[in-house]
DNA sequence: GGTGTGACCAGCT
DNA sequence: AAGCTGGCCACAC
């Protein structure tokens, strides 16, 4: 309580973290999909903002599996190095080219469709 | 307590 | 066709 620094103080963040952690290995999802799954459709920005706090969470969040609707690695700059996100994705077998996930439609993991 | 911002999305010009 | 603005909600100062 008294969120003085504990990022887990918020429910929304925990929900986002939980969904991201549920993303299978070698799969990717989008901010809007998570937002829609949480019921806050249109608030995809909050998901991205939650990801920003993901590194504050004690739990390791595979934020590299979260990309924008176009499959573009928009948040690559927030990993400390712009190449880390792509490196992590390629490490999982996800091919990335031009900061974009190849076969994004096939690797796309929708929580509202597969998680249920 | 109000204002600003943010790793987006979709629509309008 | 392409660029930009608005809108959405939650967190920090």
Image: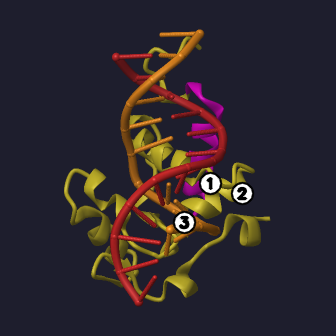
Chain colours: A yellow, B orange, C red
Residue at 54 percent across and 81 percent down: it is A107
- Please report whichever mark, 1 or 3, sits nearer to the chain's N-terminal start: 1
**Nearest to viewer (mark 1 / mark 3):** 3
Under tag 3, what secondary structure? strand
- Residue A110 on the magenta segment: no
Under tag 1, what secondary structure? helix
Disc on res. A71: none
Q: Main secondary structure of the magenta part?
A: helix
Tell whether label 2 touches label 1 (CB within 8 Å). Answer: yes
**A63 or B10: nearer the eye?**
B10
Disc on res. A37: 2
Q: Residues within 10 Å of mark 3 (few under 14, many from 20)?
A: many
Q: Position of residue A43 (x, y in %)?
A: 61, 49
Q: Position of residue A10 (x, y in %)?
A: 60, 29
Residue at 55 percent across and 60 percent down: it is A31
- Please report whichever mark, 1 or 2, sits nearer to the chain's N-terminal start: 1
Q: Position of residue A3 (x, y in %)?
A: 52, 17
**Nearest to viewer (mark 1 / mark 2):** 2
**A51 or A61: nearer the eye?**
A51
Determine whether A74 is above or below A51 in the image. Answer: below
**Magenta stretch bounds:** A9-24
Q: Which residue is mark 1?
A: A19
Q: Position of residue A55 (x, y in %)?
A: 38, 41
Q: Is residue B6 left or right of residue A9?
A: left
Under tag 2, what secondary structure? helix
- Please report whichever mark, 3 or 2, sits nearer to the chain's N-terminal start: 3
Disc on res. A30: 3
Which quadrant of the structure image shows residue A5? top left
């Amino acid at each position: 309580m008294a969120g003085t620094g504990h990022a887990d103080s918020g429910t929304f963040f925990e929900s986002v973290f939980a969904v991201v952690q549920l993303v299978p290995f070698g799969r990717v999802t989008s901010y809007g999909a998570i937002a829609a799954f949480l019921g806050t459709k249109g608030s995809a920005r909050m998901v991205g903002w939650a990801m920003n706090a993901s590194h504050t969470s004690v739990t390791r969040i595979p934020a590299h599996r979260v990309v924008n609707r176009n499959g573009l690695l928009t948040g690559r700059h927030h990993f400390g190095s712009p190449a880390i996100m792509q490196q992590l994705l390629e490490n999982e077998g996800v091919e990335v080219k031009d900061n974009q996930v190849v076969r994004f439609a096939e690797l796309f993991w929708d929580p509202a469709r597969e998680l249920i």
